[in-house]
Image (cartoon, grey):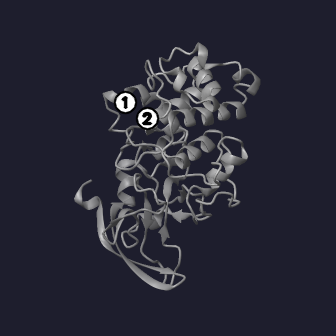
Amino acid sequence: MPAEAQIDQQYVYNSKTGEKTAQVKGVSLAYVLKEKAGVTAENAEVIFEASDGYPIDPQQLTDIFNEDMDYVLAYEVNGAVIDNDGVTDNEEITVYRNVKVAGEFGTVFKMVNKISVGEATVPAAEGAVVNEETAGEEPSIVFTDITEEYKFAETAIIDLAKRGIIDGIGEGLFAPQNEFTREQFCKIIVESLSLETKEYAGAFSDLSADRWSAAYVQAAVDAGLFKGYEDGTFKPGQMISRQEMAVVAANAAIAKGLVTPEKLAKFVMEKSAYMDKASVSNWAANAVAWLEAKGAFTGVAGENFEPLKVVNRAEAAVVVFNTLFAE
């Protein structure tokens, strides 16, 4: 980003405990909308969507373009990288702006993952470039780090990004190599089925109601997609394995009406082509076998399935796309 796009300044904001200040580093939102997204409108309503579903009041484009307001896509506050969800491996976007009226609340917007201008939608991660003059057309999405190693996942990644199911991490990056957690997979599977998030009922001892993923976990559990562990935990931040992912993907396919439980049960690992098929757990066998037959693991698994291998973002995108959206 050029120098004129960078912001490094002190912001004043109000909280329940009084006035506070923060030294914030980030990228000018006005710059991103004008220069990266090609927004040409001068006056429109702007909607920030938070990944945890927290409601954010609509903003005005005129305010965002007002240099005195200094809306910033922040990546560092008081010298520390932003971490609102307790997951250190993922990058997050928080938007700060200057106060417009003395004593004003609501000038800090956390966990923003999508910004809508009129009819145009701009992911905060800058993965999608949208021109408002062609807002009715399908947005163009480009991630600069889909190297040859991850080309097998490019179609799936772009498709899910266009559907708003999966986001980049900022600066036009997708980070295909980053490992995926159980709560992160909860989110994309809930989004894939267009399920409504649910108020967390507090069933798991290691998941609090204020965690960003709680509403997604509740929706996934209620829909029969995910289960917790026998000790009463959910392990939201634990990396998800291939066989765990397979079970959730198969459950999602059942929920979508793509396969019945009875048909799924007919697929067995004894007929699998994987060399290590005997290492797949019994509770995951039918799901793995059905997904293998469906071609869901194309590009993900080779001669061996490696059921305990941790899933990365590219692999998660491929399996979700091939299971739920590929024709």
Q: Secondary structure at mark 1?
A: helix
How many marks overall? 2
For badge 2, the amino acid type reads: Ala
Say few, some or many: other residues with alpha carbon within 10 Å of mark 2 (under 14 / 14 to 19 / 20 or more): many
Q: Residue at x 58, y 59 (%)?
A: 206
Is the residue 198 above or below the residue 324 in the image? below
The circle on residue 283 is none
Residue 213 left/right relative to 123: right
Q: Position of residue 84 (x, y in %)?
A: 47, 63
Q: Secondary structure at mark 2?
A: helix
| Cα separation between marks 2 and 1 | 7 Å
Residue 136 left/right relative to 20: right
Which sits in the foreground, 124 or 267? Answer: 267
Q: Residue at x 66, y 42 (%)?
A: 194
Which residue, given by chain and number where applicable, does mark 1 sit on?
150
Q: Residue at x 51, y 48 (%)?
A: 121
- Quadrant containing the C terminus is top right
The circle on residue 314 is 2
Is the residue 41 above or below the residue 172 in the image? below
For badge 1, the amino acid type reads: Tyr
* Labels 2 & 1 near each other (Cβ < 8 A): yes
Q: Answer whether residue 325 is visible to the viewer in this image.
A: no
